Image (cartoon, grey):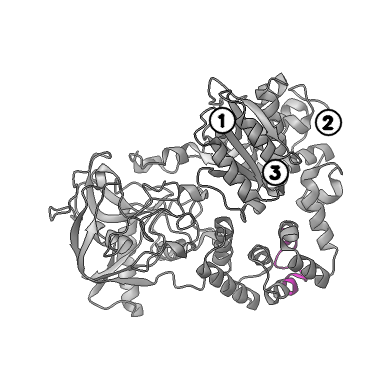
Amino acid sequence: MTTEKTATGGGPRDAAILPLLARFTHEDKEAKGLRAFSGEAAGPRRPVHFTAAEMVFMFPALLLHAPDGGGKTTFARLLSEALNGEGTAARDHLFRPAHRNAAGDLLAHDLPDVLPEVVLCRRDDDAEAMLAATLARGDTPVLLIIDALETRADPEALLVRSAAVIKGQPSLRLLVLCESRALEGIRRPASIPEYGLLGLARPERAAFETENGFSGAHDEKDFVLPGLWRLSLDIGRPVAPRDVAALAPTDAGWAESYRDAAALEAMSDEALLAAVSARPARWAGPFDLLCDWIGPDAPRAAALARGLARSEADLPVLLCAGKLVATGTAEAKALTAALVDAIATDGAPAGLRRRAGEVLARLGDPRDLEALASVPAGLYPMGGDIHPNSAPAHHAPVGDFRIGVYPVVNAAYLRFVTETDRPWKSVNGRNPERASHPATDLTWHDARAYCAWATEKWRAEGRIGPDEIVRLPCEREWEAAARGPSGLLYPWGEVWAAEHANGEETGFNDLCTVGLFPEGRAPSGCLDMAGQAWEWCTTLWGRDMGTPAFAFPWQSDGREALDAPADIRRVLRGGCFSSPAWKANGVYRGSLEPAGSWRGNGFRVVVAKG
């Protein structure tokens, strides 16, 4: 088949990679605050993703990442050409209407009226010199693009320097591009948010193929890496990742990691283990690809996993080995124990923690995720000046109670819905890799039904006494557990700290396995009380989303009534994965109608005398 025909005037290797979609949706953007509930019948919303081009102009500084073959370098080049007036074809294709999901929703780009010039720092360019040159451009609107962050001598220092250069410079914007696995081990400043790239949506690929006379490739997948799909078009058939090394052109730089993976595959077990253990930074990425190809059922999988466990491999390599381990095996038990120790030790970059949590959940999390922390009775600080809805600071009484160290997780909630047949509209709550994530997409009524079920279950198991019940916390109890007797702003102290919580700056834009941030432990011993997931309380808020009818200071005014009208909102606390620091703390108050739900709100339980 021909590879020269294209609707934009260039070769299909350029036209076929755009537009890329980001892992950031219109709903995600709206959910920076809690929205008014639109009604139970509406159901989950279909995700409508922003394009990579739109994301560039949404933030003063931005980091986008994708695996090798994700189209990052080509996107950077075409964006540069489009904005610098070096090619009308690039501009027309880059900014044309785009399909925003696998269902085919087509939307025009939403871009600013005035677009900047681009300074493109390629893989082999001196990034520090180009930073200085960009700063010297004065008031000229400039977008600095730094490609291939992972190849720089000191990526973290470069990010810090880049953030400092654009700070206070309204005419400057920054886009950094990085390979996804490498980024997991790189810390970045909070002022540079990160988002992943999805690749090409099915309807986008279908439209290009129809317009250019190509036959279908990877039609069964919602999203495909542009490099892999582009290679499939050139070959004339779908190409499996394992075949990329043999089929990709020698000048295809994105295929280098695939070629390295093939080289590892050709080694003996002993030679492979020696290479990966000796130089993990060099081989972790290719080894990760190879582990995808091998899988846990291959004859050499168990031997490689045992060898890595004995070698005390670095965390990135251990995480690769998780793909070689079958659930319930001795190798799985050894690996999960090592991962629990790594999480409890803290200090690893957030990206590595997230993947460690997913491996831990898939193989069987050995931690007691229903553990309870005791909070003694007393007069506890409540409220503060972080937001008018949370003022004034005062004290409120609580009695003795125990509270979940962790939010209720998917695995526990799944046992409940399995036994009771209660509907659960979570899209991915049943995914094994998310078994240890907080259970979300839950109404206040769902959370209370779980508590009633758990009361009977835990009494029968002897976990609680016959005179104790499981219930949701009232707002006073939640805040006492999060802030302690000294009334800390954040569970860990008075100053926001990086890698203490899964909030906006962590960049996940999603839930993660509970307990990954032990640095953020509250005085009560609870984890994940800032960020992660908004947590239901019994306490009433009122009908108006903006102003609470049951305002602070706390008083005994009926705000704990369980039989209030359905349109009166209930309090949510703690913030979620998309919350900034001024929401992800122990003071800020949120709310939602009791029949409302979202992928960012869950709950934890309290145990107390009935």
Q: Which residues are magenta?
A: 290-304
SS class, disc 1 = strand
Q: Which residue is identified by label 1? A: 172
Residue 272: x %, y % from top left:
80, 67
Q: Inspect the image, locate mark 3, and give the three-letter code of the amino acid beneath it.
A: Ala
Q: Whole-percent x and y of residue 382?
A: 23, 56
Q: Where residue 608 appears, x then y in whole percent?
A: 25, 70
Q: On the image, which quarter does residue 96 sit in?
A: top right
Give me the residue at 53% from left, 20% from top.
113
- Mark 3 or mark 2, earlier in chain: 2
Q: Amino acid at mark 2?
A: Thr
Q: Residue at x 69, y 77 (%)?
A: 310
Quadrant assignment, res 65:
top right
Name the residue that disc number 2 marks: 3
Q: Is residue 544 magenta?
A: no
Residue 271 at least partly seen: yes
Q: Does dot 3 land on a helix, a strand or a loop?
A: loop
* Residue annotated with mark 3: 148
Q: Is residue 187 above or below residue 205?
A: below
Of the pair 419 and 47, the residue shown nearer to us: 47
